[in-house]
Amino acid sequence: MSEPQTISVSATISPATTAGLVEKTPLERYQPPAKPSLVGLSRAQLTEALASIGVPASQRKMRVQQIWHWLYVRGARRFDAMTSISKDLRATLDQHFTLARPEVVAEQISADGTRKWLLRLPGEQSLERPHEIECVYIPEADRGTLCLSSQVGCTLACSFCHTGTQRLVRNLTAGEIVGQIMVARDRLNDWADRETPLGNRLVTNVVMMGMGEPLYNFDAVRDALLIVADNEGIGISRRRITLSTSGVVPNIIRTGDEIGVMLAISLHAVRDELRNELVPLNRKYPIAELLQACRDYPGASNARRITFEYVMLRGVNDSLDDAKLLVKLLKGIPAKINLIPFNPWPGTKYECSDWDQIEKFSEYIFNAGYSSPVRTPRGRDILAACGQLKSETEKLSASERQALRAMAMTD
């Protein structure tokens, strides 16, 4: 198979343009292919698909289970690999459907082992440029985390986030979200049973922290994560799946009720006036309303704590007064605070807090009784770190790439 080639796609808007926005409007919509993929269909939808091609009702449940196993346990990419299914049915399936995943356009591997894939998806108009998203795999000693995207671009315009400078092109389908896991396991050869430090799988955890705001694409994200968590398929426990939101309050409770995964909140500020700037969605759902939704989150407990993500910005939100107010705001919420050293990107006005200040901030929170790990920056040299995902990484100049490598080496 030939190596994926890098292509350039122009889909940016300047940070100045996004400064006043709370939400963006999608520019395009998903256009289903003439021959759809079975990846991402629920069991009920898969049953309907089989009925549409004449599979007898008495056989559908068995055939769904067989296809489900071949797709999500064995990672089949062609129908002819499904040897427990009759040749005639395999041929019929091949006439009407595919097992296609998103196309890998480029793969980058960081010095720390982080991998980032640029994935191509069909655009609304066949003659227009395709859509692109990014997916990141982060290997660690005790886990392998896959960071998934939920939108092409992002609904929001958070001022410190590189992804937020993109237009919102469209929402991803459930199949395109599940397809990112399929791609990762394909590229990592992570389908075969084998012994590894993590057991027999390299991808053990999933985080909805890539491009996009998951709760502005709730139905597709829910349907995809239910497939990811299905113990007869991909089988990643709900306690190993984390959904991160900037605070779409109406869908936070729904996440607990309908998906049941771990929740992370992109907080980043403890005062509404600052959070209005950093996370403009705060103008619609202010801090008090957001934290009340967290207090009401179904299943939250000391064993299932809510993670509050807090990016450390020098001279902006990193004072001890900020730490004190953060502790006060989170009182009564089973929580941990994940401190994120700011990951620079070309054109940003922000700088990462000094390491001494991050440690002082973390120590105060820890002494107040909260876990306050500092997230180790990963994949900075390939723009794969938190807040850096954007589909145009190939357009960076040589000087920008050199600067990013230098940033990565400072940790």
Image (tube, grey):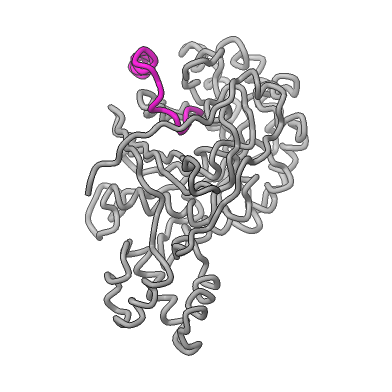
Quarter assignment of residue 138 = top left
Q: In this view, does 395 lie above or below 60?
A: above
In percent of width and height, residue 71 lies at 37, 65
Q: Is residue 402 magenta?
A: yes
Q: Is residue 86 left or right of residue 256?
A: left
Q: What stretch is highlighted in magenta?
A: 387-411
Q: In this view, does 238 lie above or below 316?
A: below
User: Which residue is most to the front?
Assistant: 127
- Give whichever of 363, 248 is nearer the camera: 248
Magenta portion: prevailing SS class: helix
Residue 411 is at least partly visible in this image = no
Q: Is residue 218 left or right of residue 407?
A: right
Q: Does the magenta stretch include residue 288?
A: no
Q: How many labels sit on residues? A: 0
- Give whichever of 24, 251 is nearer the camera: 24
Q: Which residue is drawn at 60% across and 37% down?
A: 168
In percent of width and height, residue 395 lies at 40, 24
Q: In this view, does 37 lie to the left or right of 336?
A: left
Q: Which residue is drawn at 22% across and 57% down?
A: 194
In percent of width and height, residue 195 lies at 22, 54
Q: Which residue is drawn at 55% across and 24% down?
A: 311
In percent of width and height, residue 299 lies at 63, 53
Q: Where is the C terminus found, in terms of image quarters?
A: top left
Q: Is residue 180 above or below residue 22?
A: below
Q: In this view, does 86 lie above or below 248?
A: below
Residue 175 is at least partly visible in this image = yes
Q: Which residue is drawn at 63% across and 58% down?
A: 258
